[in-house]
Amino acid sequence: MNYFAHGRPFVADPYFLAGTAVPDWLGVVARKVRVRRPQAERVAGASDPRVAAVARGIVQHHADDAWFHQTTAFAELSSRFCLQIRDAVADDASLGPHFLGHILVELLLDAVLVAEEPARLDAYYLSLAAVDSAVIEAAVAEIAGVPAAGLGELIGRFCSERFLSDYQDDAKLMFRVGQVLRRVGLPPIAAALAGLLPDARRMVAARQAELLPPDNESSRGDFVKKWDRHRADNELGNKRG
C-alpha cells in the first residue's frame, strides 16, 4: 500500500497519520534507517502521546502491508503488470518489471481512492501539515535508534508538493514512477509503459475492495486497538482522579 491507502482512515489523528507515512518517507530520505514493527511496538506506550501515536501509526503501516501483500488481488495484478511490462520493453529485465508491477498496483490504488474522495486528500494534507516535524524526527530516532537526517525537511516538501494528486494523470504518474526508479538505482522508465496505464487503472479500480483491508475505515490491527483502549482507560482514570 502507498501513502493515501495507508493514511486515509486516520486523517483526524495527525501524528498517527504521520506514523503511517514514516516508513515510506524513510525510503526517500534515509533508506538505511529502519523502523520495524517490533521496534515501534516498544515505543507505542511512550509518555509523549504524539510519539506514541507515531509509533502506533508505524505499526499500522506494517500491519496494512502484511495484509495487502498476501491478497490474491495484489499477486494477480502485480504479476499481470510485470508480464505486460516485460512485453512492452522486449523482456529487458534491467528495467525491473517485477518492481514496476508491484509499485503500479500501489500507486494506482492511491489514484483510485483519491479520485473517489478528493476532499479526503485535502484533509490528509491538512492533517499532516499540522504536525511538528521535530516530534516526528524524535519519534523515529527513538524507534530506530539512529537519527533520520532530512526527515523534517522532507515532510514539509511532501505537504507542499501534494504529488499524490499527480497519480490521476498518466504523464505525471510516469514522471513520479521515474523518480522512484532513480531512487532505487533502476534505469529510466520506458515510454512504452504509458500505453499500459489506462487498462491498468481499470483493473485496479475493479479490484480495489479486495486490495483494501476489511472495514478499512476503522481497522487498526489488534496491537493498535489495544493501545487505543489503554490510552482511553488512562484518560478515564485521570478524569475520575
Image (spheres, rainbow, N blue to C red):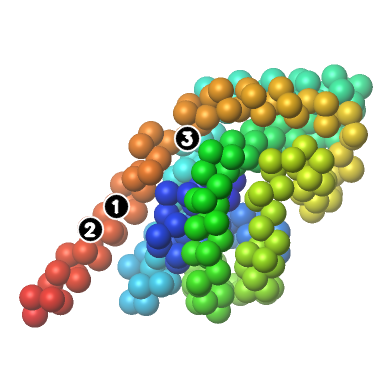
Q: Secondary structure at mark 3?
A: loop
Tell me, yes or no, whether the two marked residues, 2 and 1, touch with CB atoms within 8 Å.
Answer: yes
Residue 71 in view here: no
Looking at the picture, how far across and down is residue 226, in whole percent?
A: 26, 54
Q: Nearer the viewer, residue 233 or 119?
A: 119
Q: Which residue is mark 2?
A: 229
**Which quadrant holds residue 148?**
bottom right
Question: Between disc 2 and disc 3, whose residue precedes?
Answer: 3
- Reading the image, the residue beneath label 1 is 225
Position of residue 68 relative to residue 40, above or below, is: above
208 relative position to 79: left or right: left
For the point 82% across and 46% down, the residue is 175
The local crowd at label 1, few if under 14, some if 14 to 19, many if 20 or more residues have their Cα within 10 Å, is: some
Q: Nearer the viewer, residue 114 or 213?
A: 114
| Closest to the observer, 209 or 181 | 209
Of badges 2 and 3, nearer the viewer stands 3
Q: Is residue 140 visible?
A: yes
Q: Is residue 186 above or below residue 230?
A: above
Q: Dot 2 surroundings within 10 Å: few (below 14), some, or many (20 or more)?
A: few
Task: Determine the residue positioned at 77% across, 37% down.
Answer: 170
- Helix, strand or loop at label 2? It is helix
User: Could you tell me if the residues under marks 2 and 3 are in contact, i.e. CB atoms within 8 Å?
Assistant: no
Numbered label attached to residue 212:
3
Amino acid tagged 2: Arg
